[in-house]
Amino acid sequence: MCVMSYFIEQLLNGICQGSIYALFAIGYTIIVGVVGLVSFTHGEVITIGAFSALFATTLGGNHILLTIFFSFAGSGLVGIVIHKVCYEKFWDSPRYIPLICTIGMSMLLKNTIQIAFGSETKAMPEVIPQGGIHFGEYMVTNVQITVIVVVVALCTILSLFLNKTKQGIILRAVSQDRKGAALVGIDVSKATLLGNLIGCGIGGVAGMLYALYYGSLSASMGGPASMKAFSASVLGGLVNTPASAIGGLLIGILENFGIALFSSSLRDMIAFIFLIIVLLFFPKGLRIQFRRRAT
């Protein structure tokens, strides 16, 4: 295989993996944006989404839409529980109290998943048929196509929701200024509940795609996934979803080339390196906005 062919192959793999990491980061950014606190439960939310998809395959066979629904619903419901337990009763408490609560909830969820599904790695059924589309000497697999299509579709739906609906605009207002939103009559508690549901649901779908892409899942998969979500979100200052998505995409591409050129042991280290570089050069993150031109 020539150098150019190898480069393109790794780039395609990196874009696919980075798309999943972008969803990790988008879900995490929505949660942090509306809650105003770093959450330690996102890894477990991602894991629950993957196992919800696995459960869906036992009920209705290998249907991608069914697995997407179950992964979003399963993680979204957990997001509601997290909001009720860790945030709703502590808005007026010191900020470290809900933060500590999310740590305890993370440990509870992790152990519950291990008890329910076991600690061993499980195979993810082939929801997507094998094969792909050939472009000359290159082939994009059906799984890669599915991942990219689902990610683009979710991002499009989310963008329309946040910019075109009343509830979406309320979420953006709460994310930008919680106190100001409350002063103009917005129910901040309901808005954060909805934000937690959506953010966790998106994280769950990302967990399903992660398991689908690698063909396996385990109770411990949430740890590395949450680190990548956090590292990517830092590029957006933990509040800017477009920049966080770009961060996830960059981590996926860098990770893939790092593994190809050096060693697979660098897979999780690359996210840490990315985090350090971003904190050194962009400590407040990037602010990226997409605006329509005036006509």
Image (cartoon, helix red, strand yellow):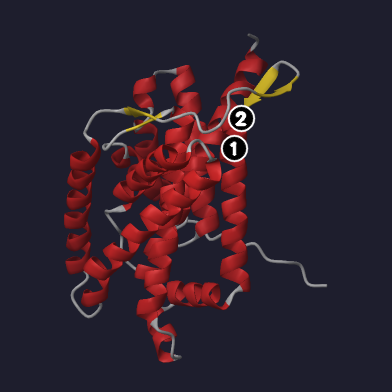
Q: Amino acid at mark 2?
A: Asn
Q: Quadrant of the N terminus?
A: top right
Give the side of residue 23 with respect to residue 217, left or right.
right
Seen in the picture, residue 6 relative to 268 is either above or below; the reply is above
Task: Return the x and y of residue 119 as percentages of the image width and height.
Answer: 22, 32
* Cα distance in 3D space between marks 2 and 1: 6 Å
Give the side of residue 8 with respect to residue 76, left or right.
right
Label 1: few (<14), some (14–19) or many (≥20) C-alpha neighbours in 10 Å: some
The residue at 61%/17% (across/down) is 6
Task: Return the x and y of residue 259 as percentages of the image width and height.
Answer: 44, 22
The residue at 26%/74% (across/down) is 88
Furthest residue toward bottom: 184
Seen in the picture, residue 113 relative to 294 is either above or below; the reply is above
Question: Quadrant of the rendered structure where residue 31 is?
Answer: bottom left
Question: Quadrant of the rendered structure where residue 7 is?
Answer: top right
Give the side of residue 161 with respect to residue 283, left or right.
right
Q: Nearer the viewer, residue 256 or 170?
A: 170
Q: Amino acid at mark 1?
A: Thr
Furthest residue toward top: 1
Residue linked to disc 2: 142
Task: Return the x and y of residue 132 as percentages of the image width and height.
Answer: 65, 25
Please tell me whether mark 1 sits on a helix, a strand or a loop. helix
Are the residues flagged by discs 2 and 1 in contact, CB closer than 8 Å? yes
Does residue 270 appear in this view? yes
Does residue 33 appear in this view? no
Seen in the picture, residue 166 relative to 260 is either above or below; the reply is below
Question: Quadrant of the rendered structure where residue 3 is?
Answer: top right
Please tell me whether mark 2 sits on a helix, a strand or a loop. helix
Label 2: few (<14), some (14–19) or many (≥20) C-alpha neighbours in 10 Å: some
Give the side of residue 80 with respect to residue 241, left or right.
left
Residue linked to disc 1: 146
Task: Return the x and y of residue 211 as percentages of the image width and height.
Answer: 42, 35
